[in-house]
Every structure is written in structure tokens, then in C-alpha cells.
Image (cartoon, helix red, strand yellow):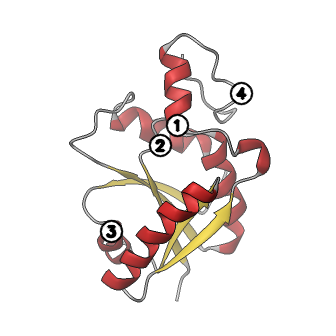
Amino acid sequence: MKRIAIFPGSFDPITKGHESIVKRAAPLFDKIIVAIGVNSSKKGMFDLAKREELIKKTFENVSNVEVMTYSGLTVDFCEQQNANYILRGLRSNADFEYEFTIAQMNKLLKNKIETFFLLTEPEYSAISSTIVKDIHRNGGDVSQFIPAAISLK
């Protein structure tokens, strides 16, 4: 059986923290699908096509990473993609509390799907898409917080 992981998120925008998690996890899985969740009630800074483009560019040299979009439950998307793992990054205790609850609910919904947590590297623990968006909206330079392969200009 192939080890396929889904790395779900809004990635609005993708950050160096996201990039680090995926690149560090890539050797552990046969395939990682960076899955951009579509939430119609959420207005993103970047449209879906732009986020997909930025993520593809970020991982263009990582052969076992794919980028897809989805809506609905992550565990249902996992089943559609024959993925038995959900990959999540943890920056803080608050992230753990939140992700733990979601992982437990996902386990109740689809028992065969395991959540795999990877700690963020310390230098990326303060970086969040929300903060990066705010800096960018206000004209600040976000280049130190986003993957080197992309630009938000």
C-alpha cells in the first residue's frame, strides 16, 4: 500500500513554515498532496488559482508532491485520494490543542486515517499566513516569510 498524505490548508499564502513541513515530510511518504481547502464563506487574499500556482512553484523540485483543491471534509478527500494520512504542522501549544481535537474527530469519522504531526522548525514558529497577509496588505516586505521560489508582488 502506498503511503499517501494529505497536507490540508488554505495556504493564503503559503509560508516558509508550510514549505518546511512538506519538504521534511516528503521522504516519509510516497506522495504528499498539498490540498487547498475551498471555503466559500471565507474571502481569501489570493484567489484559488493564484494559491495553486504559488504552491506548485514552491514544490516544483519535489517529485512526490502534488497540489490539488477540494471542498468538504478532509477525511472524505483522503478517501477519494486513497490517502491514509493527514499531515499537520504544529507551531505552538495552541496549535496542538486545536489540531488534537480535529484529529480525534477525524479518527471518529474515518478510523483508518491517521494524523501525522510534525513540529515546525523554531525559526518558523511565529510565522502564520494571517500575519503574512496583514504585513503584505500594509505594504510590508514579506519575502523573509514566504518560500524563496515565489513572490507576492
**Crowd around label 1: few <14 · some 14–19 · many ≥20 (10 Å):** some
Q: Is residue 6 in view from this perspective?
A: no
132, 100: nearer the viewer:
100
Give x and y (percent) for residue 19.
64, 48
Q: Where, by quadrant of the figure, is residue 118 drawn?
A: bottom right
Residue depicted at 44% across the width and 82% down the height: 113
Residue position for label 2? 11
Kind of element beneath mark 2: loop
Front position among marks 3 and 1 = 1
124, 72: nearer the viewer:
124
Give x and y (percent) for residue 33.
49, 61
**Crowd around label 2: few <14 · some 14–19 · many ≥20 (10 Å):** many
Residue position for label 3? 77
Kind of element beneath mark 3: helix
Amino acid type, label 3:
Phe
**CB contact under 8 Å: marks 3 and 1:** no
**In the rendered structure, which disc, 2 or 3, sits on the residue that comes first in sequence?**
2
Front position among marks 1 and 2 = 1
Amino acid type, label 2:
Phe
**CB contact under 8 Å: marks 1 and 2:** yes
Residue depicted at 40% across the width and 82% down the height: 107
Residue position for label 4? 144
Amino acid type, label 1:
Ser
**In the rendered structure, which disc, 2 or 4, sits on the residue that comes first in sequence?**
2
Residue 123 versus residue 26 in the image, above or below: above
Q: Distance between the residues labelled 2 and 3?
A: 17 Å
